[in-house]
Image (cartoon, helix red, strand yellow):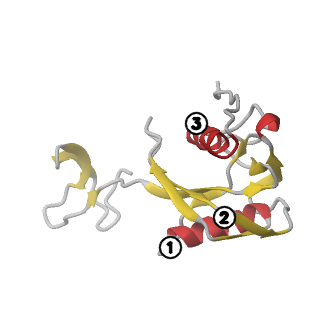
Amino acid sequence: MNSCPICGTKLENSEIGGRERLICGSSSCEFVNWDNPKPVTATLVPHGEGLVLVLRKFEPYTGYWCLPGGFIENCEDPSESAAREVLEETGLTIQDHQLIGAVAPGREINVVILFYEAPSSSGTMEAGDDASDVRSFKHDELPPNIAFELHRKAIRKWFETHHGKSPVLHPIV
């Protein structure tokens, strides 16, 4: 962002609240680019003895598996976002989903991920939206190419908690 979205004046760096921020250079405009993180949901959906993963159709990580999820829409309740993303990507309707954690990946990735668990689901599993495939993976069937470090950690913790086993999940190189 180079120009103020309100008045078009060139943006300048300034310290506000102990951090460098882009502000409008006009003395009559008070725009500050706070650059807040984008909220995202990711949902652990048990199915049979495994967890539902989707194969990503688009970047980043095209052709890698991940938990169903995505960005929360404008004015959307986070739990509704979790249910919507699961339905759009997997064809499954989740019920009684619970927020189980919120984390930020760091490393200049400006999102906050809200992890949900959905103990029950209904519908027919079918890839949709931005997924090219969807499957339920048991502990010993997990693919080596799971995108996103925090998804791998959540999957590992789920299998440890629910099956007493820790799957081997490979980091992305």
Which residue position is annotated with label 1?
77
Which residue position is annotated with label 2?
85
- Asked whether 23 or 17 is in front, the reply is 17
Q: Which of marks 1 and 2 is nearer the N terminus?
A: 1
Picture quadrant where residue 6 is located: bottom left
Residue shown at 72%/66% (left/top)?
Answer: 120
Quarter of the picture holding the C terminus: top right
Structural distance between the alpha carbons of marks 3 and 2: 20 Å
Residue shown at 67%/42% (left/top)?
Answer: 159
**Label 3's element?**
helix
- Asked whether 35 or 104 is in front, the reply is 104
- Asked whether 120 or 8 is in front, the reply is 120
Please give the label number shown on residue 86: none
View extreme (top): residue: 173
**Label 2's element?**
helix
Residue shown at 80%/67% (left/top)?
Answer: 91
Please give the label number shown on residue 149: 3
- Residue 85 higher or lower than 37, as above or below: below
- Residue 13 higher or lower than 41, as above or below: above
User: Visible in this render: residue 113?
Assistant: no
